[in-house]
Amino acid sequence: MKNKAILLNNNTNGLLLPGLLLPIWLILYINLSNISNFITFNIFQLPSETHLSKTLWFFIYEVPKVMLLLVLIIFFVGIIRSYFSPEKTKKALEGKSLFSGNILASLLGIVTPFCSCSAIPLFLGFVEAGIPIGVTFSFLIAAPMVNEVAVILLLGLFGWKVTLIYVSTGLIIAIVSGFIIQKLKLEKYVADWVFKTKSTTTTIEESQLTFQQRIQQGFDTVKEIVGKIWVYIIIGIAVGAGAHGYIPENFLGNLLGDQNWYSVPLAILIGIPMYSNAAGVIPIVSVLIEKGVSLGTALAFMMSVIALSLPEIIILKKVLKWQLIGAFVSIVALGIISVGLLFNYVM
C-alpha cells in the first residue's frame, strides 16, 4: 500500500507542471494571428499589403506556431521514446524476413527520429549485427524522411491530407528501395572492415522508470531536439517569409508547375546539393506550394533534400563503396520522381 501511495504521488507530481503549461500553450496558439497583427501593424506600424509587411507578418506568425507544435508533440514523443532504445530497435529487426523486415525497419524509422547523418551510426550497428543490407537501408531512408518533426510541421502547415500523402509515400519509398537493394545482392559493395567489426553490445538491465521520470524524459527530449533544430527552423521560415513577400506570384509556378515535364527531376537536382532537415525545408516547401509549385514537385524537392543530402553521401562513403552509394541514390531518386509525377498527375 505504501509503495502504491508513493507511486501515485510521483505520478501526480509528474503531471503538475505539464498541466500548468498546457493552458498557456493553448492561449498562445489560439492568439498567434492576433499577436502577429499587433506586432506588424501596431508596433512596427507597417502598411498592409506591402512586401515588407507580408514578409514580417509571415515570419512572426510561423516561428512561434512551428515552435509551439514541436514542443507539444515532441514532449509526448519523448515519453513514448522512454520505452525504446537503439539496442531494442536493433533487436526488433534481428531475424526478420526480408519484406517484413523492410516494413518494420521503415516503421521504426518514424519513432526513432534521427537526421540522415546521425542515423548512420545506428545503420552501421545494424550491418555489424548481421541484419540484411536492404532492411538497414529501409531504416536509413525512413528515419530522416518520415519522423515526428516532419509530421508535426506538415500537419501545422498543410493539414492531415498532405501529411498522410507524404508519410505513406515516404514509407513506400523506404520499403521498396530497401527491398530492391537487397534483391540486387549489393553486400559486396559494403566496406570490408564493416563485416570484420564485431558488434560490441552489452546487456544492461534497464531500471524501471517511474512516470515522473518519463515526464522528465519528455522535457529532456524537447530540449535536445528543439535545441538542435531551432536554427534550421528560423532560417527556413526566414527564407520562406522572404519568398512569401517578394517573389512574384506566378514565377515559381511557371518554372516548377505540373505543366512542365521536367519540374520533378529539376526539383530533385536542386534539392540534393542542399542540406537541411525537415524543420528547415518544410517552411520553404509551404511557400513553394503557395507560389504555384505543384504538390508532387514540392514533395519531391523536400524528399530529395532530406533523404539524399550531400553530407549523408559523404559519410556513407566511409562504410560503403561508390557502386552501392550510386545504386542507393538512383533507386531512391527514381522512387521520389515516381511519387512526384504521380501526384502531379492525380492532383
Image: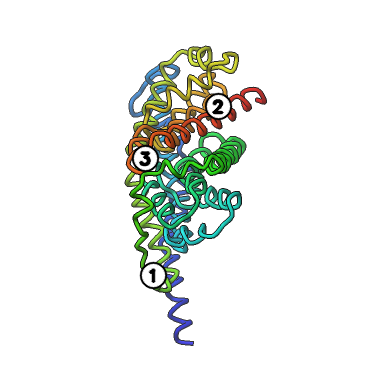
Q: Which residue is mark 1?
A: 203
Mark 3: which amino acid?
A: Leu
Decide if residue 61 is in sight here.
no
Q: Is residue 254 left or right of residue 269?
A: right
Q: Residue 323 appears at what percent x and percent y? A: 42, 34
Mark 2: which amino acid?
A: Ile
Element class at badge 1? loop
Return the mark for residue 316: 3
Return the mark for residue 331: none
Element class at badge 3? helix
- Sequence-first disc among 3 and 2: 3
Mark 1: which amino acid?
A: Thr
Decide if residue 247 is in sight here.
yes
Q: Quadrant of residue 39?
A: top left
At a point 59% along the width and 54% down the height, the residue shown is: 97
At a point 47% along the width and 50% down the height, the residue shown is: 73
38 and 8: which is toward the camera: 8
Q: CA distance from mark 3 to mark 1?
A: 28 Å
Q: Residue 244 appears at what percent x and percent y? A: 44, 22
Q: CA distance from mark 2 to mark 1?
A: 43 Å
Q: CA distance from mark 3 to mark 2?
A: 22 Å
* Comparing labels 3 and 2, the label whose residue is closer to the camera: 3
Q: Which residue is mark 2?
A: 337
Q: Quadrant of the C terminus?
A: top right
Q: Is 333 drawn above or below residue 75 in the view shown? A: above
Q: Residues within 10 Å of mark 1 (few under 14, many from 20)?
A: few
